[in-house]
């Protein structure tokens, strides 16, 4: 395939593009060189490439950043997606399009909530999630008109190279700073009791690769482990793999009410055979190794 990837310079994109190229695909990679909120710029990029597959990764991906700039987040996540879909259908008719959304679209329920299925109602509760939900709804409208659009609700994923704006990487960076003596032996945290569903980024990339296959139905798919883990368990695993035992300090600016969000990926597994393969403890070891080698 000739695959156009938006957001190719981000955490997932920098790992996905080489994987696609290694499998023999031709890849046109765009990142900050094309402003996805600029419809004309997006149209020109697609007119040059004429792809027969698209993976739309470009997004404002931080909940915290979306709270600071709701309008900017919505423009990128919703209007940017509309521009990409319009250009893809104009210059790549019939292309398989992956629109990357988020597990954050679901209600982040109480501690006993079951894993979320694709048929569950949506309850986005941040500007980030609301923009993603609007983008997915637009993509669904286009799919109902015949476009080959796969909508992917990816749950939390991490790995070496992820920015420390995200919780596991934030913990790992602080632990490595404590190890090297550049941070006092106190680690700032939010709510450690909340429950999430975490994957290694390379398992998520494998799901995207499988969903590029036009033989897979163009549907909505969760990409999730189905395994609940508390934020505190992530922290303890990181500390166990380190050489320090820091004191824990709750930062009110990071604290949010206790909630739970776990996904059910049965539909993806039945459609593609996908299963997560990488133990999450190995993922966390890789995060520590990254921050030891790349001090901030």
Image: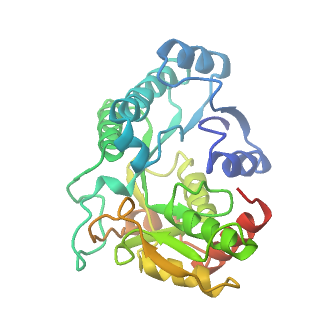
**Residue positioned 44% across, 22% down in the render:** 86
The x, y position of residue 291, in whole percent, is 71, 64
Q: Quadrant of the N terminus?
A: top right
Q: For residue 272, say whether it is visible.
A: yes
Q: Position of residue 16 (x, y in %)?
A: 67, 49
Q: Image quadrant of residue 210?
A: bottom right
Q: Is residue 152 shown above or below 113?
A: above
Who is closer to the viewer here, 63 or 226? 63
Nearer the observer, 185 or 200: 185
Residue drawn at x 74%, y 70% as measured from the top left? 289
- Label count reads 0
Q: Is residue 42 above or below residue 106?
A: above
Q: Residue at x 63, y 22 (%)?
A: 50
Residue 153 location in percent, x, y?
40, 54
Residue 80 lies left or right of residue 14; in this view the side is: left
Q: Report which quarter residue 277 is drawn in.
A: bottom right
Q: Is residue 285 above or below residue 123?
A: below
Which of 142/204 is in front? Answer: 204
Residue at the image position 26 percent from the left and 75 percent from the top = 114
Q: Which x, y percent locates residue 137?
A: 29, 38
**In the image, 64: left or right of 163?**
left
**Considering the image in quadrants, where does the C terminus appear?**
bottom right
Seen from the viewer's position, the closer of residues 120 and 34 is 34
Q: How is the image coloured?
A: rainbow
Q: Is residue 227 visible?
A: no
Splitting the image into 4 quarters, where does residue 145 fall? top left
| Above or below, comparing residue 55 to residue 243 in the picture | above
């Amino acid at each position: 395939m000739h695959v156009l990837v938006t957001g190719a310079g981000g955490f997932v994109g920098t790992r996905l593009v080489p994987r696609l190229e290694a499998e023999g695909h031709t890849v046109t990679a765009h990142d900050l060189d094309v402003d996805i909120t600029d419809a004309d710029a997006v149209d020109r990029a697609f007119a040059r490439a004429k792809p027969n597959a698209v993976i739309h990764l470009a997004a404002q991906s931080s909940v915290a950043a979306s709270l600071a700039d709701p309008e900017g987040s919505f423009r990128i996540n919703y209007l940017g997606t509309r521009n990409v879909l319009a250009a893809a259908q104009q210059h790549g008719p019939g292309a398989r399009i992956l629109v990357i959304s988020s597990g954050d679209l679901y209600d982040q329920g109480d501690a006993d909530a079951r894993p979320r299925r694709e048929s569950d109602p949506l309850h986005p509760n941040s500007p980030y999630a609301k923009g993603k939900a609007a983008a997915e709804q637009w993509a669904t409208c286009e799919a109902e008109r015949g476009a080959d659009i796969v909508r992917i609700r990816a749950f939390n994923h991490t790995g070496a190279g992820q920015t420390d704006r995200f919780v596991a990487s934030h913990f790992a960076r602080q632990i490595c700073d404590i190890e090297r003596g550049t941070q006092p032996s106190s680690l700032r945290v939010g709510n450690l009791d909340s429950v999430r569903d975490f994957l290694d980024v390379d398992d998520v990339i494998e799901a995207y690769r499988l969903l590029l296959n036009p033989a897979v139905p163009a549907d909505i798919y969760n990409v999730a482990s189905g395994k609940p883990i508390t934020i505190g368990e992530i922290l303890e695993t990181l500390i166990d793999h380190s050489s320090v035992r820091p004191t824990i300090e709750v930062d009110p600016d990071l604290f949010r009410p206790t909630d739970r969000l776990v996904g059910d990926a049965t539909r993806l597994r039945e459609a593609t055979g996908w299963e997560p393969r990488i133990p999450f403890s190995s993922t966390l070891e890789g995060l520590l190794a990254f921050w030891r080698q790349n001090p901030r």
